[in-house]
Amino acid sequence: MNLDEIRNLRLKELHSKTNAEIWKRICDMKERESELNFGDCVEIRSNLNESERADILDMALNLRSWRKGPFKIDDIFIDSEWRSFVKFNILKPHMNLEGKIVGDIGCNNGYYLFKMLPFKPKKLIGFDPSINTFMQFKFINRFVRSSIDYELLGVEHLPYYEHKFDTLFCLGVLYHRSDPVKMLKELKGSLNKGGEVFLDTMYIDMRGEFALSPKKTYSKIPNIYFVPTIDALTGWCERAKFKDIEILATKDTDFSEQRKTDWILGQSLENFLDENDPNLTIEGYPAPKRVYLKLGI
């Protein structure tokens, strides 16, 4: 597989009629000296004047939907659909990234990558084929001015990537893959000796080694193939030859973490659940729950 050909095809999408105007505006942005705070909100203090503020606000609105965040640029608060610090804070006590090559598979707009900067990794690389989230990342990074690399590639490209990783994050990706064991093997094969994977996925809170396979959608999401029990999930990890499998936490997905805001287009969690019983999805399946794992080789 020629990754450079894939990269070039993705970059052509940036110059399509759909993306050309906003992409040019991002490229024309000057990099600015900014004061940064990587708390729950990635805060940027840049002392924008009135004209600059209006332009930045317009660009941010044109980059909707903002799924991961939040971000704040001066007084512009990008209130993302997901309060992503909830997930990050679950994983944070288990992270040791200093001096390591770290990848984030399905990195969206890079929120987690920005949050990892204070952990002093050797290298940060994000993978996501979405043009819109790539542009969101480039927009924010004009202020942050980090050396994070963002690859317009997916997990299926990892076996062909130029180098391996000490730590991989793969958050909210597994259920989008039709062959989850193959994906886990791809993650494992991309690690250096002693490497680790932080994995987050939805699960069904039942006993037994089985998985829900929705006929059409799960929580109104069409591209979900399998939602396993934790027993089934750990079995998948064992089949992928991970030796150390640690359950870090489980959590219900609730409205304090995911909800509709003015910064997304379309629906959110309140539209995905049964209006008479929030313990069920709109299709009648058990409502989403998340499990967080640390996998070692």
Image (cartoon, rainbow, N blue to C red):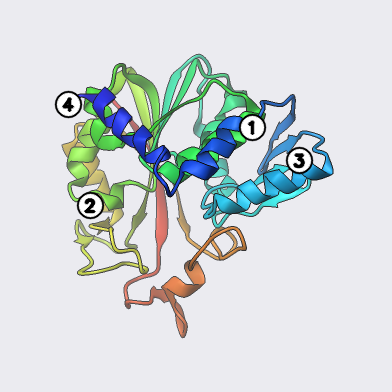
Q: Amino acid at mark 1?
A: Met
Q: Which mark is residue 29?
A: 1
Q: Of label 4 and label 3, which has the lower sequence position?
A: 4
Q: Could you give the CA–CA distance between mark 2 and mark 3, rounded to whole angstroms?
A: 52 Å
Q: Position of residue 294 (x, y in %)?
A: 38, 36
Res 189 visible = no
Residue depicted at x 36% and y 27%? 196
Res 48 → quadrant? top right
| Left or right placement of residue 206 versus residue 50 in this view | left
Q: Position of residue 132 (x, y in %)?
A: 46, 45
Classed neighbour count for the residue bearing mark 2: other residues with Cα under 10 Å, few (<14), some (14–19), many (≥20)? some
The residue beneath circle 4 is 1
Judge the density around disc 1: few (<14), some (14-19), many (≥20) Cα neighbours within 10 Å: few
Instruction: Please name the residue that numbered disc 2 is placed on.
Output: 232
> Which residue occupies 36% across, 69% down?
220
Instruction: Please name the residue that numbered disc 3 is placed on.
Output: 52
Q: Secondary structure at mark 3?
A: helix
